[in-house]
């Protein structure tokens, strides 16, 4: 099973829930319209298990090459239904919380083309 198929199955089964914003967990679909779920290595569904070692390898590489000292990572699965849903420009960390030092994104969209939209845009502080 492809990872994209496993994610789609989770979404169809209701395992992904409407995403929320911030520590207050506010639901604001006009800002963020995806459905998400968080997984650890032990509860990751079989079709998505191959992703874990890839992200673990990235964590180790970031520690080796960029000296980030990352001890762990979180795996969030997200599905954007494709009807204009989006996640407005945002910072991936909470103010005063240094826990998220890097973010990695893997798109599982089969046959995606730039004309479909949805490209990740990153802004640096400067």
Image (cartoon, rainbow, N blue to C red):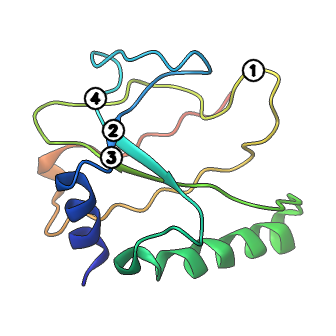
**Image label count:** 4
Residue 66 at x, y percent in the picture: 83, 63
The residue at which mark 1 appears reads as: 95
| Residue at the spot of label 3 | 16
Residue at mark 1 to residue at mark 4: CA–CA distance: 22 Å
Which labelled disc corresponds to residue 68? none
The earlier-in-sequence mark between 3 and 4 is 3
As measured in the structure, the alpha-carbon distance from the residue carrying label 3 to the one carrying label 1 is 26 Å
- In the rendered structure, find residue 33 and report the number of the disc placed on it: 4
The answer to whether residue 24 shows anywhere in this view is yes
Do the residues bearing badges 1 and 2 touch, measured as CB atoms within 8 Å? Answer: no
Check if mark 3's residue and mark 2's residue have beta carbons within 8 Å: yes
Instruction: Tell me the CA gap for discs 3 and 2.
Output: 4 Å
Specify whether 123 is left or right of 19: right
Disc 2 on helix, strand or loop? Answer: strand
- Residue 8 on image: x %, y %: 21, 61
Q: Quadrant of the C terminus?
A: top right
Q: Position of residue 93 (x, y in %)?
A: 67, 32
Which comes before the other along the chain, label 1 or label 4? 4
**Looking at the image, which is closer to me, 60 or 21?**
21
Q: Which residue is mark 2?
A: 17
Camera-side mark, 3 or 1: 3
Q: Secondary structure at mark 3?
A: loop
């Amino acid at each position: 099973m492809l990872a994209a198929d496993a994610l789609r199955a989770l979404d169809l089964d209701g395992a992904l829930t409407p995403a929320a914003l911030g520590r207050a967990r506010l639901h604001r679909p006009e800002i963020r319209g995806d459905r998400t779920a968080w997984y650890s290595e032990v509860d990751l569904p079989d079709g998505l298990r191959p992703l874990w070692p890839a992200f673990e390898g990235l964590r180790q590489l970031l520690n080796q090459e960029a000296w980030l000292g990352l001890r762990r990572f979180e795996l969030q699965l997200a599905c954007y239904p494709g009807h204009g849903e989006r996640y407005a420009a945002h910072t991936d960390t909470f103010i005063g919380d240094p826990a998220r030092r890097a973010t990695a994104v893997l798109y599982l969209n089969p046959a995606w083309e730039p004309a479909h939209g949805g490209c990740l845009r990153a802004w640096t502080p400067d």
